[in-house]
Amino acid sequence: MIKYIFETIEVPLVYAQKVETVKKSAWGSEGVYKDIEKPIGPFSTSMDACEYVFGDKNLRGVYANMNDKNKAVNGYRFFTKGNKQITFKNLNIRGVKKAHLLIRASSKNPHTKETILYNMNACGYENAELVAFNGNKSIMRVECTNIDCHEKMEWEYCHLTLPSYVGAKCEHCKEIYYGYSKLGKTKHCVS
């Protein structure tokens, strides 16, 4: 049985460039701009760049004006240069359930701490910690499935063992994963 599905996503690196207006056009943000500082970056997403530069990651117009030398947002021009590969180690929980490798619980035979930790290990979660025990609603602390990210998050056990689930991702990695995997920018490798 395949335990992990490695998925690599190509992410363009985003930079922010402080600019000053040389010539302003009648259409608002369009014009001719001159670079006045070194570029800031790289960032994995335009939202990361916005949060670093402006303190607000939901600033409108940055993504729409990306790579346009004639447009700036609040004195900054945003552009992409180069790519970075991010690899996710997704779990094959569907395969684990089909192979009947999980210990099932019932009202007569409820989960214990040991059975929950065994099931988490069987699903492929490494270094899973039991934070609060409450049967199927136990809270688990698991690592992000991005190989380069070591952030831990807490989830309910019942959510972590759903057949459609591919593994926990922190908020930052979740934005990257769902943003770029829907664009078809992923490569799968089974291991």
Image: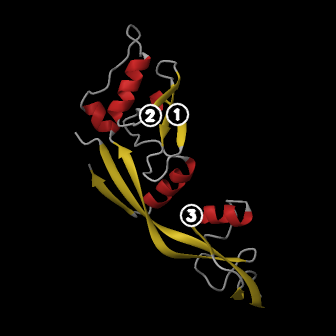
Amino acid under disc 1:
Trp
Amino acid under disc 3:
Thr
Other residues around mark 3 within 10 Å, as few (<14) / some (14–19) / many (≥20): many
Other residues around mark 2 within 10 Å, as few (<14) / some (14–19) / many (≥20): many
Residue 24 in view, yes or no: no
Q: Which badge, 2 or 1, is on the more N-terminal residue?
A: 1
Name the residue that disc number 1 marks.
155
**In this view, 89 is above or below 83:** above
Left or right: 52 with respect to 152? right
Left or right: 74 with respect to 150? right
Alpha carbon of mark 2 to alpha carbon of mark 3: how far? 27 Å
Residue 178 in the image, given as x and y percentages of width and height: 48, 54
**In this view, 133 is above or below 140:** above
Image quarter of residue 42: bottom right
Q: Do the residues labelled 2 and 3 touch (CB within 8 Å)?
A: no
**In this view, 93 is above or below 27:** above
| Front-most of residues 85 and 180 | 85
**In this view, 126 is above or below 8:** above
Residue drawn at point x = 65 percent, y = 70 percent:
62
Name the residue that disc number 3 marks.
45
Residue 129 in the image, given as x and y percentages of width and height: 48, 30
Kind of element beneath mark 1: strand
Residue 154 in the image, given as x and y percentages of width and height: 54, 34
